[in-house]
Amino acid sequence: MKTNQGHRIVVMGVSSCGKTEIGQRLAAHLGGRFLDGDDYHSEASVAKMSRGEPLTDDDRAGWLARLSEILGAARTADETLVVGCSALKRRYRDILRQGDPALTFVYLRGSRELLLERIQSRKDHFFKGEAMLDSQLATLEAPGDDEAVTVDIDAGIETVVARAAEALAERYATRADGAAS
């Protein structure tokens, strides 16, 4: 489904919810490009997370600002860009929206049990451990319907991508209807 105008989308949620895999497939479905927000963490932040230490707001500030700049450049270019980014707090999402006020969030929601199972099965990733997951879940300010489309991750990857694509299509149709009136 190639869109006739660019959209910027952040696929968000806690670690192991599927931001990268779902984001990549969603970008392909929309005819856009995918960017993994984790690739933009500083070396110090990656080292900190590798030691099992949660990041602070100060640790995240430069990272979020850089992602906002990238989203802004994609907006200027009218590019469809899907970014995988935890975006756990509303103020983090507000920083990202500075680059594109029309930014859409797709919140990938899953149970703690499912998320922990996925974390424990991951290899070669800096984010490990139950304590880190619990820290993210405690930090999470789940977005409301006014801010994001919420997609449950309790199904296979293709189903989750289809759910996300359908929810986005509905959101964009609603925005277009509102703009036309």
Image: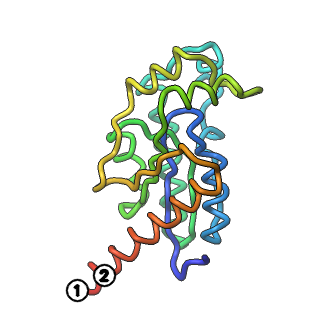
Q: Residue at x 63, y 20 (%)?
A: 128
Q: Mark 1 points at which residue?
A: 181
CB under 8 Å between callouts 2 and 1?
yes
State the colouring used for the structure image.
rainbow
Q: What element carries label 2?
A: helix
Dot 1 amino acid type: Ser
Q: Mark 2 points at which residue?
A: 177
- Residue situated in front as seen by the camera: 127 or 109: 109
Cα–Cα span, label 2 and label 1: 7 Å
- Quarter the N terminus occupies: bottom right
Task: Give how far across and how far down residue 74 sits, in percent.
Answer: 54, 64
- Residue situated in front as seen by the camera: 164 or 55: 164
Label 1, residues with CA under 10 Å away: few <14, some 14-19, many ≥20: few
Dot 2 amino acid type: Asp
Q: Which residue is drawn at 48% across and 27% down?
A: 112
Q: Single out the residue that lies furthest toward the bottom.
A: 180
Task: Give how far across and how far down residue 177 sits, in percent.
Answer: 30, 81
Total labels drawn: 2
Q: Decide: is 124 above or below 19.
A: above
Task: Give how far across and how far down residue 62 sits, in percent.
Answer: 49, 36
Residue 16 image-quadrant placement: top right
Label 2, residues with CA under 10 Å away: few <14, some 14-19, many ≥20: few
Q: Decide: is 71 above or below 122.
A: below
Q: Residue at x 52, y 48 (%)?
A: 67
Q: Residue at x 35, y 39 (%)?
A: 142
Q: Single out the residue that lies furthest toward the right.
A: 124
